[in-house]
Image (tube, grey):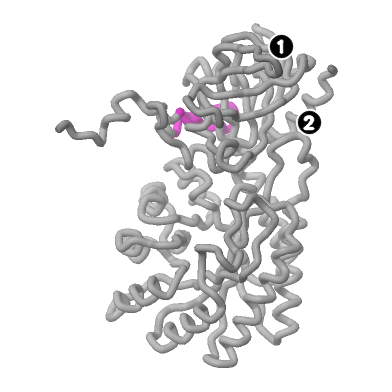
């Protein structure tokens, strides 16, 4: 087998990834930082985030919006994808909104210096603590249901509330894994059209600061076509609300969830521009058809802002050969990346040392945990690999660490921020003592 696959795999890595000559041969490097040196310095498993790739993703969205939509626009980062103090500081510097689900993510965003008007709070069943934090720190609350709206109406008596948006369930999902669909009629998320109209009436009666509508159909999709019929449903609802109550939203947010390529077989992936152009064009046409003014357009790009900026590094321990498989046993797996076990997500990888070596056949890359589902990558063409070698898995920036866990006593890995040759530790590796920090003896 030849090594023609290597250049395609490199396209999955952060934009600042290079193969550089070192004293020990060719190594993968990101932003001028040798990945082997980073692994020796910070240990493995290790997560890396490249700032230049993050910046470029934001610029792609901003340029697409500037070309496609004449009214005001905004971009919201999904805190659930990955949020820490350093990421919150980066968000503040880029003047992005951050979607926080509950009091925990709100706390991180506030500690990272995100301004109130840039904090937007989601949540399908917000607790009292979540609502308290949202009222205290957020600029916008996306109301999921009528019970939540009643609670907000009660606490609004004599007190100011953040702006409110209604989350609408359009009855239509995008083409993605069942576990990532959110817009279908039986989804647990959002309000039906009838409930949303009732919510508009309540807000008008109570004088609540209702300024927007939101809908979301699912995450990690690659064809924007299903957004159009859902947008039609939402615009019909807005037209009905205007006719009955005179209310119009200042902002429409059609969610996000635009996908990315995780494997070289998924390249080339449709560009962000296609997604943004589709939404902007259909929103403008839909508003014109109904005689509605153009609202502010807020997008929630989700993983397409952050996934490619992240790389996970693992060290190979044992190598096993079973009748039909070559197993590369890694020192991380489903505790830092549960997506393959949860969604059947497909990934790729390259060795850090001499990544251009020709493949020697397929390999199965598995973690050390006591579950047969702890397999990160299946049947991936890989070169001959020796115990102790480092493996780099690209597109690791979203929904890995945020769903991390301590199964089998695993400790969450360290996170390093890469920026123009500088590597900064932004999250420490968990320690053994961290595993019992919350415990109390009998």
Q: Is residue 316 left or right of residue 155?
A: right
Comes first in the chain, label 1 or label 2: 2
Crowd around label 2: few <14 · some 14–19 · many ≥20 (10 Å): some
Could you say where residue 86 lies in the image, as x and y percent from the top left? Answer: 46, 40
The location of residue 376, given as percent across then percent down, is: 60, 30
Residue at point 44% right, 55% down? 101
Q: Quadrant of the C terminus?
A: top left
Q: Residue at x 72, y 78 (%)?
A: 286
Which quadrant of the structure image shows residue 412? Answer: top left
Residues shaded magenta: 413-426
What residue does disc 1 label?
384
**Residue at image mark 2:** 8
Q: Position of residue 316 (x, y in %)?
A: 57, 15
In the rendered image, residue 392 lying in the magenta stretch gets the answer: no
**Residue 75 location in percent, x, y?**
59, 58
x 53%, y 55%: residue: 95
* Distance between mark 1 and mark 2 Cα atoms: 19 Å
Residue at 42% from the left image edge and 42% from the top image edge: 85
136 or 204, nearer to the observer:
204
**Element type where label 2 sits in the image:** helix
Judge by depth and name the residue closer to the eye, 331 or 429.
331
From the viewer's perspective, is residue 61 above or below residue 14? below
- In the image, taking residue 359 as reference, residue 303 lies left or right, namely left
Nearest to viewer (mark 1 / mark 2): 1
């Amino acid at each position: 087998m030849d090594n023609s696959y290597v250049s395609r795999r490199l396209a999955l890595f952060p934009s600042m990834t290079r193969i550089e000559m070192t004293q020990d041969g060719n190594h993968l490097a990101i932003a001028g930082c040798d990945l082997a040196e980073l692994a020796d310095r910070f240990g493995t498993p290790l997560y890396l985030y490249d700032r230049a790739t993050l910046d470029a993703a934001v610029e792609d969205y901003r340029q697409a919006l500037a070309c496609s939509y004449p009214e005001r626009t905004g971009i919201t980062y999904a805190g659930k994808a990955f949020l820490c103090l350093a990421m919150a500081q980066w968000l503040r510097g880029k003047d992005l909104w951050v979607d926080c689900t509950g009091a925990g993510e709100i706390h991180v965003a506030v500690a990272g210096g995100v301004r109130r008007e840039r904090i937007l709070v989601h949540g399908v069943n917000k607790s009292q603590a979540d609502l308290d934090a949202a009222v205290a720190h957020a600029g916008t609350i996306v109301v999921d249901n009528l019970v939540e709206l009643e609670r907000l109406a009660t606490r609004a008596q004599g007190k100011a509330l953040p702006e409110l948006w209604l989350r609408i369930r359009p009855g239509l999902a995008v083409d993605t894994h069942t576990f990532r669909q959110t817009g279908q009629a039986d989804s647990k998320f959002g309000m039906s059209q009838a409930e949303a109209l009732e919510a508009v009436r309540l807000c008008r009666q109570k004088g609540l600061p209702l300024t927007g509508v939101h809908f979301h159909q699912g995450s990690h999709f690659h064809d924007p076509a299903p957004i159009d019929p859902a947008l039609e449903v939402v615009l019909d609802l807005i037209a009905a609300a205007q006719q009955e109550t005179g209310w119009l939203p200042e902002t429409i947010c059609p969610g996000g969830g635009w996908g990315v390529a995780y494997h070289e077989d998924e390249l080339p992936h449709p560009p962000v521009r296609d997604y943004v152009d589709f939404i902007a064009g259909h929103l403008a046409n839909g508003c014109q058809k109904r005689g509605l003014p153009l609202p502010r357009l807020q997008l929630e790009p989700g993983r397409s802002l952050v996934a490619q900026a992240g790389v996970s590094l693992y060290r190979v321990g044992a190598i096993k050969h079973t009748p039909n498989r070559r197993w590369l046993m890694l020192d991380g797996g489903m505790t830092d990346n549960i997506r393959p076990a949860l969604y059947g997500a497909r990934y790729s990888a390259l060795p850090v040392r001499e990544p251009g070596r020709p493949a020697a056949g397929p390999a199965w890359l598995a973690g050390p945990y006591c579950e047969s589902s702890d397999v990160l990558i299946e049947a991936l063409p890989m070169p001959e690999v020796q115990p102790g070698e480092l493996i780099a898995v690209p597109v690791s920036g979203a929904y890995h660490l945020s769903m991390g866990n301590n199964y089998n006593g695993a400790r969450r890995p360290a996170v390093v921020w890469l920026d123009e040759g500088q590597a900064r530790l932004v999250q420490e590796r968990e320690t053994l003592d961290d595993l019992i920090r919350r415990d109390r003896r009998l």
